[in-house]
């Protein structure tokens, strides 16, 4: 019988998924254990308590190979809590994709999974490509950008910006978006629909008497579904701006586009309506605690820092640990100006969470008779899943606005919002001034 060697399983073949490959490693480990047991069984059947020298060599060879297989298995094992499985109408594929924390790069993930080449230290700058398309000048381009110029296409009246640039734009937007800074988890999507498994119930340990039965309990799992939705926008600029701004245009374009994407991510992640095609934000997700402050809301002068402390307590009561607060700049201003009865500024109490203000939270919401309220979001933000479909496209339109001496960039990407557990979030409503 042929028994697979560890050397044959050291790298995952490209034609099978990670789970299937790990199954092969486990089977090879089981085969080695069976072979070791067979050597012992043979000696037992012969009435020998010790192995012959030849049997010992065979046993040791299988044991050494088992150690090598075990090392391969442990080095490639993935925590189920950090894995997503492809969903859809058919059976789930065996592919496993990581969840990206705020410290992990979408560009690196894209390169590792074959969506974009790994270019080492060279960064493909959108502004540099745009300048070259407009002026024809290639001076100042790095190696990665020269390759990108060769890869980009100009069919149908536009240059398609290559994948490395698009992935880098996502990372720039991620570093700016408040929900990402607070710790939201990015889920790369290789298909239109992904199902993210989550634990909804756990078995509870119980004390027992001697000889008494052990209490049984089952883990309860379900999933949340991410469905890719499209977001797009158009940026126009004059050819003179691009020609005369050399080299400053290189950085300005990326920063502005990333900032616009980040602002929309914040808006939809917090307050997205869920009405197609817009994703559903935290405010409108099920399970989220909505904290009312009266029929007409209340002022920060009355709420003070108690509002933040109470929201943290609500989330901790659900066995989650909040890590950040997102609010409006006006709310931050109001908290900073809180004073006691003697006119002295009130010092924030210990234990408050970091706060990330964003102007994507309105300050003109209607609550009862009040038309000037805002909201404050507290949460364990890694429970917010931001699905991003790979391969966002950027096209430089060369003909549509040529008669106005303009060029345009058309950007679109696809993604969705989901909460692993709505109970990990609380939203204070009706916060005034």
Image (cartoon, rainbow, N blue to C red):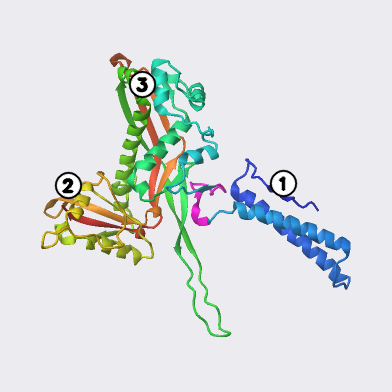
State the residue in front, 405 or 331. 331
Residue highlighted by disc 3: 246
Tag 1, which secondary structure?
helix
Vertical placement of 401 versus 49: above or below? Answer: above
The x, y position of residue 320, in whole percent, is 38, 62
Horizontal relation, residue 369 to residue 388: left or right: left
The answer to whether residue 281 is magenta is no
Horizontal relation, residue 374 to residue 423: left or right: left
Locate residue 286: give its quadrant: bottom left
Can residue 161 be seen here? The reply is yes
Range shown magenta: 80-95
How many numbered circles does the render carry? 3
Spatial CA span between label 1 and label 2: 64 Å
Residue at the location (36% across, 65% down)? 318
Residue highlighted by disc 2: 364
Spatial CA span between label 2 and label 3: 41 Å
Residue highlighted by disc 1: 8
Instruction: State which mark lies toward you, 3 or 1.
Output: 3
Residue 274 is marked as: none
């Amino acid at each position: 019988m042929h028994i697979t060697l560890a050397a044959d399983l050291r790298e995952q073949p490209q034609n099978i998924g990670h789970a299937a490959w790990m199954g092969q490693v486990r089977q090879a480990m089981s085969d080695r254990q069976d072979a070791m047991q067979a050597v012992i069984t043979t000696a037992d059947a012969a009435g020998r308590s010790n192995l012959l020298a030849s049997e010992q060599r065979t046993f040791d060879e299988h044991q050494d190979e088992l150690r090598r297989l075990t090392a391969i298995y442990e080095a490639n094992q993935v925590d189920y809590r950090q894995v997503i499985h492809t969903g859809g109408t058919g059976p789930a594929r065996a592919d496993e994709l990581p969840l990206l924390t705020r410290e992990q790069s979408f560009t690196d993930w894209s390169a590792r999974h074959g969506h974009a080449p790994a270019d080492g230290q060279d960064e493909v700058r959108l502004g540099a490509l745009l300048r070259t398309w407009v002026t024809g000048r290639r001076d100042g381009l790095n190696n990665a950008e020269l390759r990108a110029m060769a890869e980009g296409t100009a069919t149908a009246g536009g240059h398609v910006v290559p994948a490395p640039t698009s992935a880098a734009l996502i990372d720039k937007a991620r570093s700016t978006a408040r929900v990402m800074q607070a710790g939201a988890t990015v889920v790369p999507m290789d298909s239109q629909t992904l199902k993210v498994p989550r634990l909804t119930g756990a078995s509870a340990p119980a004390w027992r008497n001697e000889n008494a039965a052990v209490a049984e309990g089952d883990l309860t799992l379900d999933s949340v579904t991410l469905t890719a939705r499209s977001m797009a926008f158009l940026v126009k600029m004059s050819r003179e701006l691009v020609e005369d701004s050399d080299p400053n245009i290189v950085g300005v374009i990326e920063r502005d586009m990333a900032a616009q994407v980040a602002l929309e991510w914040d808006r939809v992640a917090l307050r997205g309506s869920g009405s197609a095609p817009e994703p559903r934000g935290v405010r409108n997700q099920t399970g989220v605690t909505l904290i009312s402050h009266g029929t007409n809301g209340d002022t920060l002068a009355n709420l003070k820092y108690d509002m933040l402390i109470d929201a943290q307590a609500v989330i901790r009561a659900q066995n989650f640990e909040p890590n950040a607060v997102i609010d409006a700049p006006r709310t931050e201003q109001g908290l900073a100006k809180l004073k006691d009865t003697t006119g002295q500024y009130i010092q924030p109490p210990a234990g408050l969470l970091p706060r990330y203000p964003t102007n994507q939270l309105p300050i003109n919401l209607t609550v009862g008779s009040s038309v000037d309220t805002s909201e404050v979001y507290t949460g364990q933000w890694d429970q917010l899943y931001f699905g991003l479909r790979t391969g966002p496209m950027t096209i430089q339109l060369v003909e549509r606005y040529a008669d106005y001496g303009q060029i345009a960039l058309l950007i679109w990407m696809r993604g969705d919002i989901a909460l692993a557990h709505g109970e990990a979030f609380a939203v204070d409503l009706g916060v005034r001034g």
